[in-house]
Amino acid sequence: MLHVSHFLFTPQGELTEVPTDIATDVASGERPMPQFADNQLRYLQVIVDHEGSKSEVQVRTAGALVHFDNQGRLKEAGMAMGERDGISRFEHDTCVQLALEGLFPSEATRH
């Protein structure tokens, strides 16, 4: 089973999970996100890979800075530069926990 979650951190400090179909449309330029017009946001993708017959779960993450134009269309995405633009360890771990939520029994994903 492969599960991909997409998260945006707004300038107001809010965490927004974006469904995969919307994230795909935004990335391809087919869908704007007007609520983020003229903004630069931090983005984190969490990929959870779990083979049903194995007891191993692999979690991979990738972060970026995403820029939206004045209509809310994705203008560019690139690597975060420096601590100010990066995703904190707390934010990272929160997104991983949210991505795991509902995929496994709660006692397996809480610590």
Image (cartoon, helix red, strand yellow):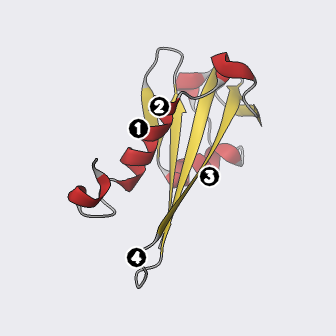
Kindly indicate the quadrant of the structure image that contains residue 42. Answer: top right
Q: Label 1: how many residues lie within 10 Å, few (<14), some (14-19) or many (20+)? A: few
Kindly indicate the quadrant of the structure image that contains residue 84. Answer: top right
Separation of residues labelled 4 and 2 (CA atoms): 26 Å
Q: Residue furthest front?
A: 111
Separation of residues labelled 2 and 3 (CA atoms): 22 Å
- The tag on residue 51 is none
The answer to the question of whether label 1 and label 3 lie on touching residues, with beta carbons closer than 8 A, is no
Q: Secondary structure at mark 1?
A: helix
The answer to the question of whether label 4 and label 3 lie on touching residues, with beta carbons closer than 8 A, is no
Residue 47 in the image: x percent, y percent? Answer: 54, 57
Residue 70 in the image: x percent, y percent? Answer: 69, 19
Residue 111 visible to an observer of this rendering = yes
Give the residue pinned by disc 1. Answer: 94
Residue 43 in the image: x percent, y percent? Answer: 60, 35
Total number of numbered labels?
Answer: 4
Q: Earlier in the sequence, mark 4 or mark 1?
A: 4
Q: Residue at the location (47% across, 74% down)?
A: 1
- Give the amino acid type for the residue marked by disc 2 in the picture: Glu
The answer to the question of whether label 4 and label 1 lie on touching residues, with beta carbons closer than 8 A, is no
- The tag on residue 91 is 2
Query: Which numbered mark, 4 or 2, is in the foreground of this view?
Result: 4
Q: Earlier in the sequence, mark 4 or mark 2?
A: 4
Give the residue pinned by disc 3. Answer: 24
Give the residue pinned by disc 4. Answer: 55
The answer to the question of whether label 2 and label 1 lie on touching residues, with beta carbons closer than 8 A, is yes
Q: Residue at the location (28% across, 47% down)?
A: 111
